[in-house]
Image (tube, rainbow, N blue to C red):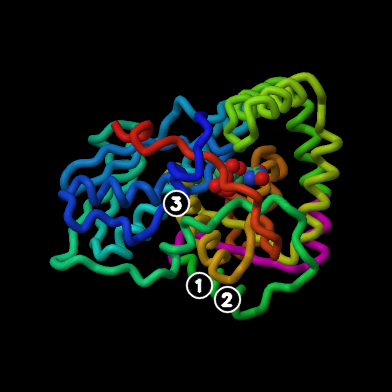
């Protein structure tokens, strides 16, 4: 991934740059500048888009799929869902009506969504809200401060999830947290004991996916490949989890690709609502990467068929030093 200077940073995006005088395609391309700021597992950005005058197609990019960490492609779909939701939020903020179809069969196995977009009759000036949060969101990797999340903010996090097929469990229960800490430690130990898992992670670190300099990326790649850093990672991750005033789990009834995309959409909405409340969010995906641990997470939902899609911690922390890199828009259009 090439290094980005501040001037050409994809994060330096403002609604004022919307090409009011541009053609229909220019405007849809502008909406996609918001889509690509979505979070994704290992910052793989496993998405591609095609743009027609009134429609954007969102594809999953299986060349960027984590075959070892994510054999079922759940995280691939969750990541695509995050990008799709950014696109929809941006489109609606600029006055478009959006008509969404998941995995339209006639467009091939990799087309995750077709989004028909009806433009407004006169240009609409966005009012901020979730749209503005897109450029301010970053995954929070620091320990959180010991400060409880107010009930009103928790209610807003719940209500921003507008999809009845996706369930959100939020908890500050010390017992649940302790249990999850144990499971995080177990998951990290198991995953890092697998050379193939470390090799895959190392490849993305080495490619600079996490925004480190060339030298640090290469050093990180060597360390993760050859050292079993499982115990160290487990200690660090349990401390991170322990510092969180709130834990969230997203689950769906059906564990298919459409529901996984839907879960990603709701995760993105939670992240953006969290930004508005001054909160940070960090997924702890190791908990779902080990199947037998993932199987235990359904117990937190009233539905007996609940399948966890993502676990994350929520709390207050200082901003990360620099935003993570993104592939340029032209690299993902085609
Ligand atoms: C499905 C999914 C799983 C993720 N798992 C983790 C994780 O286990 N730990 C973590 O620190 N970040 C995790 N992330 C966050 C990504 O690492 C992050 O989005 C990516 O590096 C880009 O950084 P940004 O979110 O700050 O833009 C995950 C994101 C997604 C969408």
Of the two numbered discs 3 and 2 in the rendering, the one whose residue sits closer to the viewer? 3
The answer to whether residue 28 is above or below residue 153 is above
**Magenta region, residue range:** 162-181
Q: Residue at position x 22%, y 47% from top?
A: 26
The answer to whether residue 331 is above or below residue 177 is above
Magenta residue check for 214: no
Give coordinates of residue 217: x percent, y percent.
66, 28
Q: Is disc 3 in contact with disc 2, using a CB cutoff of under 8 Å?
A: no
Q: Residue at position x 73%, y 53% from top?
A: 142
* Separation of residues labelled 3 and 2 (CA atoms): 31 Å
Q: Residue at position x 76%, y 39% from top?
A: 187
Q: Is disc 2 in contact with disc 1, using a CB cutoff of under 8 Å?
A: yes
Quadrant where the image shows the C terminus: top left
Quarter of the picture for ligand 1? top right
On residue 195, the disc is none
* Separation of residues labelled 2 and 1 (CA atoms): 6 Å
On residue 12, the disc is 3
Question: Is residue 311 at all visible to an observer of this figure?
Answer: no
151 or 295: which is nearer to us? 151
Residue occupied by mark 2: 155
Left or right of 188? Residue 211 is left
Q: Where on the picture, by quarter, is residue 174?
A: bottom right
Give the SS element for disc 2. Answer: helix
Q: Is disc 1 in contact with disc 3, using a CB cutoff of under 8 Å?
A: no
Left or right of 6? Residue 184 is right
Q: Residues within 10 Å of mark 1 (few under 14, many from 20)?
A: some
Residue occupied by mark 1: 159
Q: Where on the picture, by quarter, is residue 299?
A: bottom right
Give coordinates of residue 118: x percent, y percent.
18, 58
Give the SS element for disc 3. Answer: loop
Left or right of 97? Residue 134 is right
Q: Where on the picture, by quarter, is residue 152?
A: bottom right
């Amino acid at each position: 991934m090439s290094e980005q200077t501040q001037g050409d940073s994809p994060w330096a995006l403002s609604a004022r740059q919307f090409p009011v005088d541009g053609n229909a395609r220019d405007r849809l391309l502008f909406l996609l500048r918001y889509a690509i700021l979505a979070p994704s597992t290992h910052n793989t950005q496993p998405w591609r888009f095609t743009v027609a005058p009134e429609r954007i197609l969102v594809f999953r990019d299986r060349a960027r799929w984590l075959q070892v960490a994510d054999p079922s492609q759940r995280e691939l779909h969750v990541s695509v869902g995050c990008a799709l939701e950014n696109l929809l939020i941006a489109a609606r903020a600029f006055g478009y009506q959006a008509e969404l179809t998941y995995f339209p069969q006639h467009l091939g196995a990799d087309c995750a969504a077709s989004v028909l977009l009806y433009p407004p009759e006169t240009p609409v000036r966005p009012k901020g809200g979730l749209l503005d949060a897109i450029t301010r969101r970053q995954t929070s990797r620091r320990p959180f401060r010991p400060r409880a999340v107010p009930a009103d903010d928790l209610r807003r996090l719940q209500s921003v999830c507008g999809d009845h097929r996706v369930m959100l469990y939020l908890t500050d229960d010390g017992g649940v947290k302790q249990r999850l800490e144990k499971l995080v430690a177990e998951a990290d130990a198991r995953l890092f004991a697998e050379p193939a898992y470390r090799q895959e992670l190392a490849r993305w670190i080495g490619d600079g996916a996490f925004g480190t300099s060339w030298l640090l990326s290469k050093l990180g790649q060597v360390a993760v490949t050859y050292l079993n850093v499982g115990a160290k990672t487990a200690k660090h991750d349990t401390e991170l989890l322990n510092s969180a005033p709130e834990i969230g789990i997203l689950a769906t009834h059906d564990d298919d690709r459409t529901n996984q995309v839907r879960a990603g959409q709701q995760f993105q909405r939670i992240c953006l609502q969290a930004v508005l409340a001054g909160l940070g969010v960090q997924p702890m995906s190791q908990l779902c990467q080990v199947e037998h641990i993932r199987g235990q997470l359904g117990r937190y939902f009233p539905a007996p068929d609940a399948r966890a899609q993502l676990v994350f911690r929520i709390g207050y922390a200082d901003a990360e030093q620099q935003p993570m890199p993104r592939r340029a828009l032209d690299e993902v259009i085609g």
